[in-house]
Image: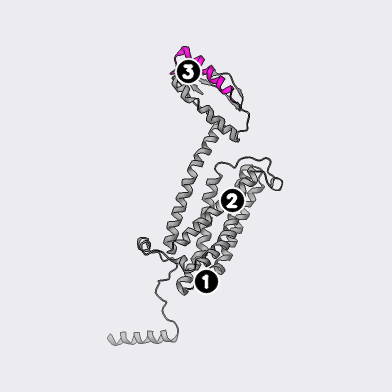
Amino acid sequence: MVDTEGVPAEERQDTVTALRGTLAADSNVAAVSPPVAGPSGGVVVMSVVPKSSPDAEATTDLVHRMRDQAPEIAAAGGALYVTGQTAMAIDVADKLGDALPLFIGVIVVLALILLAIAFRSVLVPLKAALGFLLSVGASLGASVWVFQQGHLNGLLDVAAVGPVTSFLPILLTGVLFGLAMDYEVFLVSRMREHYEHSGDPAEAIAQGVSRSARVVVAAALIMVAVFGGFVFNADPIIKAIGFALAFGVFIDAFVVRMTLVPAAMALLGRRAWSMPRWLDRLLPDVDIEGARLPAAAPAGPAAAVEESARGKEVSGAV
């Protein structure tokens, strides 16, 4: 769309004609419709049909080359706008792509802070964040391998290859982060609880895995089954989302949390539960395991004798 209100009337036709000729000469343009002017004659619309598909990278490059003509139209006194469903989809994908690093950075930093407060450790939160990034990377890589490169098309009934939908990384990161941190807290909190009472890191790992493994496995299998059900949907976008989430949860639960986390904790030993003194003083002390709660009152005959003696003292005082 060209706004020629600021262009002298005698130059408007030449400006629009020159722009149409430039667009038609592009190597990726199949056709350019004749200019259609609005009621006032100052706004002109032309439809540009690319040779490539809407999702192709060549179409994105074409949209950028079309917008590169804006300074020339502005120099003549007008304004150039490139819009339509394809252009809007490209703009949304660019915005989401620019926001993704900041989005991942914010949630990783928040996870590091909260887990450091909960577990009084630096290495445990760092390990959890690295495991989450590994799960997201593996899921996105598998999605590209299947839906963008065309592998397993027959098995998954993928009609045609194409780029991964632009909002999939944002959606996958948010959902997988919540589930990954749930599994991490389930597993490591039991390790931390046993370590606080025994002081033995190896035994704490064994106790933590044995007590939490069934919960993590059951929760992961439920989520894999739920997300995996969407793979049978005919819509390629729904299919890609279901596959990415199911694969990501499977990798995070069974490879990262149930395999790599205990292995890393065993290698770190007591260092896993260490924290610099300056950071320990800075962070609030949250005793989620209840390690510093007072011991329970004694039970049995000794407690009864003690209670009886207390009763006699009170009676004598009265």
Magenta span of residues: 5-26
Q: Position of residue 40 (x, y in %)?
A: 48, 16
Question: x and y percent of residue 105 in the render?
Answer: 46, 49
Residue where numbered disc 3 is placed: 42
Q: Residue at x 54, y 47 (%)?
A: 171
The residue pinned by badge 1 equals: 202
Of badges 3 and 1, nearer the viewer stands 1
Q: Which residue is mark 2?
A: 139
Residue 228 in view in this figure: yes
Q: Which mark is residue 49?
A: none
Above or below, comparing residue 103 to residue 75 in the picture: below
* Quadrant assignment for the C terminus: bottom left
Residue kind at label 2, given as amino acid type: Ser
Q: Earlier in the sequence, mark 2 or mark 1?
A: 2
The mark that comes first in sequence, 3 or 2, is: 3
Residue 238 vertical placement versus 294 (above, below): above
- At mark 2, the secondary structure is helix
Amino acid type for the residue under numbered disc 3: Gly
Give the CA distance from mark 2 to mark 1.
31 Å
From the viewer's perspective, tell me whether residue 311 is left or right of residue 123: left
**The one of 137 and 235 positioned closer to us in this rendering:** 137
Are there few (<14), some (14-19), or many (20+) residues within 10 Å of tag 3?
some
Q: Does residue 78 appear left or right of residue 260 in this picture?
A: left
**SS for dot 1:** helix
- Residue 72 on the magenta segment: no
Left or right side of 311 for 83: right
Relative side of 64 to 312, left or right: right
Q: Is residue 10 highlighted in magenta? A: yes
